Image (tube, rainbow, N blue to C red):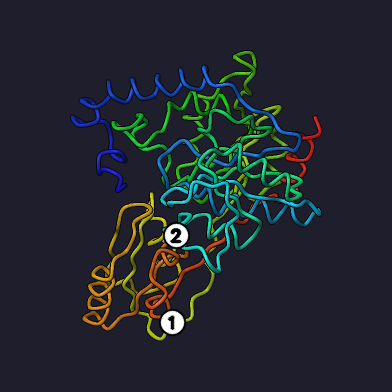
Amino acid sequence: MRAPFFWYQPHGLLSTLLWPLGWIYGKGGKILRTLKKQKRFPVPVLSVGNIVCGGAGKTPTAIALATLLQTRGINVHFVTRGYGGIQKGPLKVDPSSHTSADVGDEPLLLAEHAPTWVAKMRPQGVQKAIESGAHLIILDDGHQTTHLYKDLSFVVVDLLQGFGNGNVMPAGPLRESLAEGLKRSDALIGIGEGEIHKMTGLLRRYAPRKDEEGGGRLCEAPKEQRQSRDSASSNVMSISPSQPFFRAQSIPNPLTLPSNRVVAFCGLGFPQKFYNSLKNLNIDLVATETFPDHYKYTEKDLMRLHALARDHEAVLVTTRKDRVKIPRTWQDRLHVLDISIEFEDPEGVVDFILKSLVQ
């Protein structure tokens, strides 16, 4: 789905007209979460999700968390719904034989880093992972999953993208209201640079206070903690005492290209982040083509993109997530910008996870 233009603009006529539908959608989701019984498992289940419709960076964040936990000797498995794939599962993803048409695009990325299970009914995927020796399950895009108990829930926020106009779909980009989404989170992960002070105020407004339904209270970090960090990269806020805010950066890997002139294309929830990453590498971005999130590329699309690059005497660059959806005959003609998520306090993230799960 391509995000409507008005989702990331100030409130206007369209968002106002659609607001009642968003209210109904949000209330409906809340009722379903109340009615469904959550299944518990004997191993910890860690959820990584977001409140907006795509683009926050939850999958690369899930990979980064898995990598950190693996350094502690923890056998991490991913469980995901496999959006866009035809396989219902539970099925262990094999990148050498499965395609995005089988299991979706994101499971193929996850499977490069840890055993990954696709299951439309995610509790079945969790059970298979446990039977295969998983010490800990990371539930990718799991924040709105209602029938599975999560021992720890991270909400990922892209600080450039933010929460748009703050409305629930279809009036805005939110899957649920901020108050509902933040109430069920145990920690926030803020990626990139943005209007951090504006975001602080917004989160203070909607995050539940400690005495409200067991939530944490958003507050400024202690003065001595703020002074000990560089102002450009400090953890400006934390949810205290039990709901911290971890800062992270999306780091693009260096590209080696035959030409600095680039035609970039992608199908992401928030494509501007990809284009900005290329510009930050001092690449001459001569044209861009944006497709809906999870878009399945056709031969016709690729022929047109190839012609566009040829006309501009440029090379084609896309994302790793898009590349897995492209026929293998075309993949070698493309260049891929890989990114990784790096936490400003990785040891603090791991310690928080382990201490929370022990409790």
Q: In this view, does 253 lie above or below 74?
A: below
Question: Of 96 and 300, which appears nearest the observer?
Answer: 96
Label 1, residues with CA under 10 Å away: few <14, some 14-19, many ≥20: some
The amino acid pointed to by label 2 is: Ser
Q: In which quarter of the image is residue 330?
A: bottom left
Nearer to us of marks 2 and 1 is 2
Q: How many marks?
A: 2
Mark 2 or mark 1: name the one nearer the start of the chain. Answer: 2
Q: Which amino acid does label 1 sit on?
A: Leu
Would residue 309 be found to the left or right of residue 231 on screen?
left
Where residue 303 sits in the image (x, y, percent)?
25, 75
Residue at x-position 34% and y-position 21%:
23
- Disc 2/disc 1 C-alpha distance (Å): 26 Å
Tell me, yes or no, whether the two marked residues, 2 and 1, touch with CB atoms within 8 Å. no
> Where residue 143 sits: x, y (%)?
54, 35
Residue at the spot x=30%, y=57% of the render? 291
Label placed on residue 41: none
Query: Which residue is denoted by mark 2 in the rendering?
Result: 100
- The one nearer the camera, 274 or 195, is 274
Residue sitting at 32 percent across and 64 percent down?
297
Identify the residue at image location x=50%, y=39%: 50
Q: Where is residue 107 in the image (x, y as percent from the top left)?
A: 53, 55
Kindly state the secondary structure of the residue where label 1 is placed: loop
Q: Where's residue 345, x and y in %?
A: 70, 49
Secondary-structure class at tag 2: helix
Task: Say above or below: 114 vs 152.
Answer: below
In the foreground, 218 or 58: 58
Disc number at residue 257?
A: 1
